[in-house]
Image (spheres, rainbow, N blue to C red):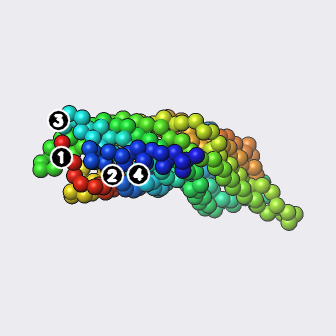
């Protein structure tokens, strides 16, 4: 479904290429931290900022004077990172050592569409574009899980911790977006963009076991990231 929809939207964006500016490029995204409820004590789980990327296609049209409309799509993989504390066992082999295992995942594909409006402002000798708007994202099915065990004095094994995260809903997830853009040269545009999704793309649970009052709760990831964008203009420059 994501692939078919990508081709349809891409075709619509690249038609009438002579009447607007069309750009294709990549985004480097930084964010998408995991939320925990309740937040476990003793820093058992940390979620650092996670890098990811997408491929974007934009179409920009001048509306009136210095006002512009921009719309497009992006295809990418939603990534996340979690650091879970090792040696949390307080029942079998307690220790004061503090180490973490890091888990990465990039298995959730997505397709998002955006529509933003903005204005061009001359700052010094450079035109800077300020855009504000929003859009929606649809995610593909995915599921990831991790489990860890510890050895017991009897020579056996006992569960230490585990978590699972999954995304199975096909509903669109709305977002707001703002960006600052400027042209590096006649062909390349650079942008700094922030995107905030209102609802979670992935949800799940976490559990710890070999502790007094072991914590457990829910996990969620909403796509919220700052992006550095490099776009290359296709075709000839349009004269408005």
Image disc number at residue 56: 4
Q: Tell whether label 2 touches label 3 (CB within 8 Å).
A: no
- Residue at the far right in the pictured view: 154
Residue beneath disc 1: 239
Above or below residue 106? Residue 134 is above
Q: CA distance from mark 3 to mark 2?
A: 21 Å
Q: Tell whether label 3 touches label 1 (CB within 8 Å).
A: no
Position of residue 1 in the picture relative to residue 236 (left or right): right
- 191 or 68: nearer the eye? 68
Give me the residue at 24% from left, 39% from top: 62
Across and down, in percent, residue 222 comes to: 53, 41
Q: CA distance from mark 1 to mark 2?
A: 16 Å
Q: Quadrant of residue 217?
A: top right
Across and down, in percent, residue 188 comes to: 27, 57
- 35 or 10: nearer the eye? 10
- 240 or 32: nearer the eye? 240
Residue beneath disc 2: 23
Q: CA distance from mark 1 to mark 3?
A: 13 Å
- 79 or 76: nearer the eye? 76
Specify which label sits upstream in the sequence, 4 or 2: 2
Above or below residue 171? Residue 101 is below
Position of residue 149 in the picture relative to residue 128 (left or right): right
Residue beneath disc 3: 65
């Amino acid at each position: 479904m994501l692939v078919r929809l990508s081709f349809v939207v891409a075709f619509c964006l690249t038609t009438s290429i002579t009447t607007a500016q069309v750009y294709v490029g990549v985004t480097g995204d930084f964010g998408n931290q995991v939320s925990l409820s309740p937040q476990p004590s003793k820093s058992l789980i940390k979620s650092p900022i996670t890098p990811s990327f997408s491929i974007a296609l934009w179409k920009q049209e001048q509306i009136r004077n210095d006002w512009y409309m921009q719309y497009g799509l992006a295809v990418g993989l939603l990534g996340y990172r979690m650091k879970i504390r090792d040696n949390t066992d307080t029942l079998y082999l307690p220790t004061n050592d503090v180490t973490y295992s890091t888990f990465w995942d990039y298995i959730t594909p997505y397709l998002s569409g955006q529509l933003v409006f903005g204005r061009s402002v001359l700052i010094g000798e450079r035109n800077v574009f300020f855009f504000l708007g929003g859009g929606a994202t649809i995610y593909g099915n995915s599921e990831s899980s991790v489990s860890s065990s510890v050895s017991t004095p009897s020579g056996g094994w006992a569960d230490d911790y585990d978590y699972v995260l999954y995304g199975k809903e096909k509903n669109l997830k709305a977002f707001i977006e703002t960006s600052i853009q400027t042209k590096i040269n006649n062909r390349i545009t650079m942008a700094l963009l922030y995107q905030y999704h209102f609802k979670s793309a992935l949800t799940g649970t976490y559990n710890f076991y070999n502790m007094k009052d072991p914590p457990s709760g829910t996990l969620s990831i909403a796509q919220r990231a700052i992006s550095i964008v490099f776009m290359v203009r296709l075709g000839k420059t349009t004269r408005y």
